Amino acid sequence: MNESYYTEDQMEKDNILSIDVITKYKTAADIANFVMKKVVHSTYAGQSISEICKLGDSLITEQVSNIFKKRGIEKGIAFPTCLNLNNIAQNYSPLSHSVHQILTANDVVKIELGVHVDGYIATLAHTVVVSEKDIEATSPLLDVFLGRAADAICAAYYGLEIASRMIKPGNKSVDVKNAIRKVAAAFKCQPCNDTDSRLMKRYILESDKHIPNVSFSKDFNPSSQYDASSHELIRSDMDYEEETFDDFEFKTNEVYSVNIVISSGSGQLRESLDEEFGILQRDVNQKYNLKLKSSKICLETAMKHFSVFPFSTRGLLDIDERLKLGLPECISHNLLCPLPVKEEGANKHSTIAQFKCTLLLMPNGKVERITAGEEMFGLPYVHSDFNVESSGMAEILKLNLKNVGEKLGLMLPSTSGDAMAMTID
């Protein structure tokens, strides 16, 4: 949803982290974490990407049906389940007939999804190295997986851990951006352009503040330009970045989707020329009087089931295959906007890794990570010849993110066991 949808006063009220708002964020996060665990354990060789995406979305829908039953609030998918394979960076949630369907051993898959409760959003992403069916995705047997893919996975993982500890009230976004680049350089990798971490607000996945993942200039070689002794990137052009990036200070009552995307290749992304659009989103600022009855029904159905959030075309057609007839007019007049699949197209053999979490910057100045905590999703069992110590940022990893939920007196549902049984009214 674009911010102009709200009045300024309503927006300020909706984005104060009160007890009620925190409860909704954390309930969404509990569901997102639960679903991610299920999807991770369903990601192994021979599985269909489309079916795994469908599983993630159906689990979100099932779990949100058990919460806040008496209040009649909106709840559901904030971002559809995506499985971004190898050099694909984002937005891959294919239709059933897509060609890249079956996972094979040693594929590197970025799993991304999001949940909202009353418009309050929790998102996360995790990278998985695909194993054979009889080997758990978290098995130490995968430690044999080496090479450049492992470098990218380690860089993205430690990039997230460091960024999560640096995003707190009073700190500056430019320092986080530079820290991510130093970690990438330590593993001889590149951050992926056209990806970023974002301030989120109620019903808004991408608000005004963002921290871009910025790759080095095309002729920059981290291997030769990184000075390990001083922990500095010594080329002046390492500060090449988007002109639109504005430094800002983090404040209390803010919520961030921290999204670290790292490539073993150039980090230069482009829209895929091979993949069809699998994700759509309503643009509430676009108005048009649809002519076709099928188009009106299509738009009404999309808004009823998905509100203003992105959704998979597959998920829409699962409701009713006939809705496909109304899609062209809705898309051509920008009422439903496709989110293109992004990939590193110059080098099909490069590997992209992604880790993502949601941070609440609490009113008392503390920070709480509500999705993808270390105790839930650790570093995959891979080995890199490089290490985070050479980035000069390793000391930050010793800082602990404080869990302040108990201090605020929150009684939140547990995600333990095979199924969640939340019946929040």
Image (spheres, grey):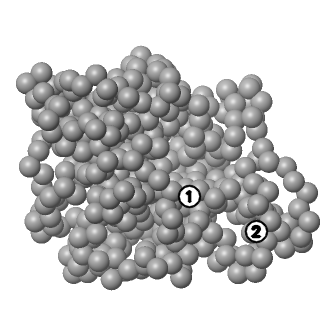
Q: Nearer the viewer, residue 279 or 220?
A: 220
For the residue carrying disc 2, how many other residues have a C-alpha within 10 Å: few (<14), some (14-19), or many (20+)?
few
For the residue carrying disc 1, how many other residues have a C-alpha within 10 Å: few (<14), some (14-19), or many (20+)?
some
At which x and y percent is residue 66?
A: 58, 63
Q: Nearer the viewer, residue 173 or 380?
A: 173
Q: Which residue is mark 1?
A: 340
Query: Does the rendering let one see residue 70?
Result: no
Q: Residue pushed farthest front?
A: 219
Q: Left of 412 or right of it: where is 190? A: left
Q: Which mark is residue 283?
A: none
Q: Amino acid at mark 1?
A: Pro
| Residue drawn at point x = 70 percent, y = 81 percent | 321
Q: Left of 98 or right of it: where is 357? A: left
Secondary structure type for disc 2? helix
| Residue drawn at point x = 55 percent, y = 38 percent | 200
Q: Nearer the viewer, residue 121 or 404?
A: 121
Screen quadrant of the N terminus: top right
At which x and y percent is residue 296?
A: 85, 66
How many labels sit on residues?
2
Q: Amino acid at mark 2?
A: Pro
Secondary structure type for disc 1? loop
| Residue drawn at point x = 32 percent, y = 40 percent | 218
Q: Which residue is mark 2?
A: 328
Indicate whether 215 appears above or below 174. Answer: below
